[in-house]
Amino acid sequence: ASIAAAGAIGAPAIYATMVSAAVLIYAVVGLLVVPYVAVALVKAGFMSPAAAGALAGLSVKTDGAVATTAQIISSYLGTDTPLTLGVMTKVLIDVWIGVIAFVLAFIWVFYVLPRRGRQAGAKPSAWELWFRFPKFVLGYFATSIVASLLVVYLASTAFAAAKAPVDAATKYLSSYLIGQGTDPFRILFFGLTFVAIGVNTRFSLLRQYGIWRLFAAYGLALLIIILIALGLAKSLFG
């Protein structure tokens, strides 16, 4: 999300890298703190297991950290509800990455850049909106549409006699595509992404670019988000 947003506004690469590093660092902190706080709140009767899962999905960043946090909560509570709610919540949040990136790109192309262009004697092209838009979002939606169509087809044919045709088709398709097809590539490219972020993260530049303030601001914002997430999870799921 941070890389997509940075690309949409044309931010220097160092800022995208450092924001990603901050997200990863705080994700580890959240992974060590949030699940145990959530379990304690559930056992104290303050919230339900579903609310604990929603809290994990709303407050912990990165998909892997959310899944792990929700899994820890589920293992302590003896139910899969937190895992299901946590992952679903995070996926729904991820869907908004493309929308937010598009809005940021639109604002920068048609409002920010024209003002700078008048000062520099140049007018930005509307094609800049396409160049700034993160193309992986299109792949995300295309994959989602194709997978959904396959699930509908299998549910109405091969799994029509099943008690829950859609669920059966989804489980089969997921195990087939991930377990026998895309999983090695997912692991490879996911690992390379974070290795690249680590290689490009130079903490010696933190003072030069004033990015320590970024880490502090992100930490404060994350604390506020966790408190809001706690209120939302409690109000929606009890």
Image (cartoon, grey):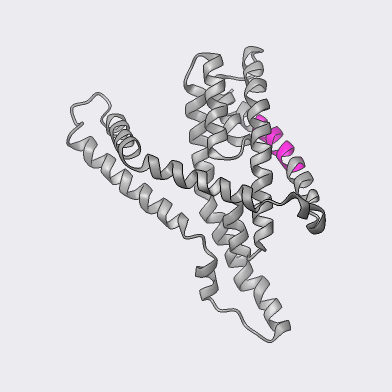
The quarter in which the C terminus is drawn is: top right
Residue 38 position within the rendered picture, expressed as x and y whole percent measured from the top left? 64, 22
Residue 133 position within the rendered picture, expressed as x and y whole percent measured from the top left? 52, 63
Asked whether, in this view, residue 129 is left or right of residue 183, the answer is right
> Residue 163 sits in which quadrant?
top left
Residue 60 position within the rendered picture, expressed as x and y whole percent measured from the top left? 62, 35
Asked whether, in this view, residue 33 is left or right of residue 193, the answer is right
Q: Foreground: 170 or 20?
A: 20
Residue for point 68% across, 34% down: 226
Residue projecting furthest to the bottom: 121
Report if residue 231 is visible in the image: no
Q: Would you place residue 100 above or below residue 177 in this image?
A: below
Asked whether, in this view, residue 138 is left or right of residue 96, the answer is left
Q: Foreground: 129 or 173?
A: 173
Residue for point 68% across, 26% down: 33
Residue extent of the magenta highlight: 220-230
Residue for point 57% across, 56% down: 4
Residue 159 position within the rendered picture, expressed as x and y whole percent measured from the top left? 21, 31
Q: Foreground: 201 or 65?
A: 201
Residue for point 61% across, 52% down: 2
Q: Is residue 160 a member of the stretch shown in magenta?
A: no
Report if residue 163 is visible in the image: yes
Q: Foreground: 126 or 194?
A: 194
Q: How many marks?
A: 0
Determine the main secondary structure of the stretch shown in magenta. helix
